[in-house]
Amino acid sequence: MIENGFSVLGLLSGGSEDTATIAATAWAARGGAQAAMVLGAPDPAVAFAWSVDGTMGLAPLALETAARATADWTRTAREVAMRRMAEAGLVAELDTVVGAPEYTIPPRLPLVDAVVLDAVSARGGAGLSNAFETILMRGRTPVLLAGGRIPAAGGRAAIAWDGGPEAGRAVRAARPLLALFAGIDIVHAPGSGDRAGAVSPEALAGWLEARGHQTRVLTLTRECGPAQIVEAVRGTDASLLVSGAYGHARAAQWIFGGATRTFLGASDAFCLFMAH
């Protein structure tokens, strides 16, 4: 069971992806986490802003119409979210914020241990994609990305370990969740992003075992990279992968590929816990 008041904040967009977010939040809550939910509603003033000669303005009638539409959307989205939460067995407060989540969510982060959102958004395929990077990079808050498979009690978790500070922060932040698993696989590919003087996977295993976790180290060949790490994690049947995020420049990762991008692309097979 999770101890010491570990808190998660589930972020909902009102779309079909919310089902996975709610399921992952419910899993953490069943393990003992304190859970709260937030539904992001569109801002009618932004949606109906118009430009004339380079200046922005609002037509009063259009704004009134947008406000009514937003209220109707919010009411329906809340009803759907509450129904999904009940089906998942999640008992949590559901709050609503109006405006872009990348601006409305950061003020709520100082006392949150992790934010839960859907993996589709993290890959840039849904309305919360901007919020993902803002929470992770600017808010310095770990994220639990709900993928196509929600963790089960007593299963296995995996850690993609390169010995870097991002991976270390992810492991330390994820420890309350890792306590819900029967075993942890530390997957390491020598040379695939290792830093000089990096902490070895064996040292990480010792650190975790001293805290009551059962571990095993899976060392891949030096020629292996992020794609092979994903395949190794699939082979362990882990339902949660813990990793650092954006250990190198984000621009280079999105242009040339990288571990973060590869892990996000494989999130149909497991949930991801990431920290920067």
Image (cartoon, helix red, strand yellow):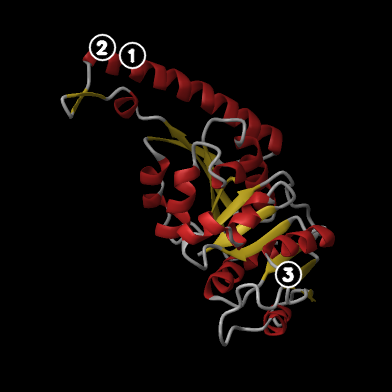
Sequence order check: which comes first, mark 1 or mark 3? 1
Question: Looking at the picture, which amino acid does disc 3 mark?
Answer: Cys
Q: Which residue is mark 3?
A: 224
Label 3, residues with CA under 10 Å away: few <14, some 14-19, many ≥20: some
Q: The N terminus appears in which quarter of the rendering?
A: bottom right
State the residue position of label 1: 65
* Circle 2 residues within 10 Å: few <14, some 14–19, many ≥20: few
Q: Are marks 1 and 2 in contact (CB under 8 Å)?
A: yes
N-term-proximal mark, 2 vs 3:
2
- The amino acid marked with disc number 2 is Leu
Mark 2 = which residue?
A: 61
Residue 257: give x, y in percent of width and height: 58, 58
Image location of residue 106, percent across then percent down: 39, 51
- For the residues labelled 1 and 3, the Cα–Cα distance comes to 56 Å
Question: In this picture, is 80 found above or below 17?
Answer: above
Per the model, the C-alpha gap separating discs 1 and 2 is 6 Å
Q: Is residue 236 visible?
A: yes
268 horizontally vs 79: left or right: right
Quadrant housing residue 179 = bottom right
Residue 178 place in picture, x, y as percent = 69, 65
Badge 1 crowding class, 10 Å Cα cut-off, few under 14, some 14 to 19, many 20 or more, is: few
State the residue at coordinates (65%, 32%). 84
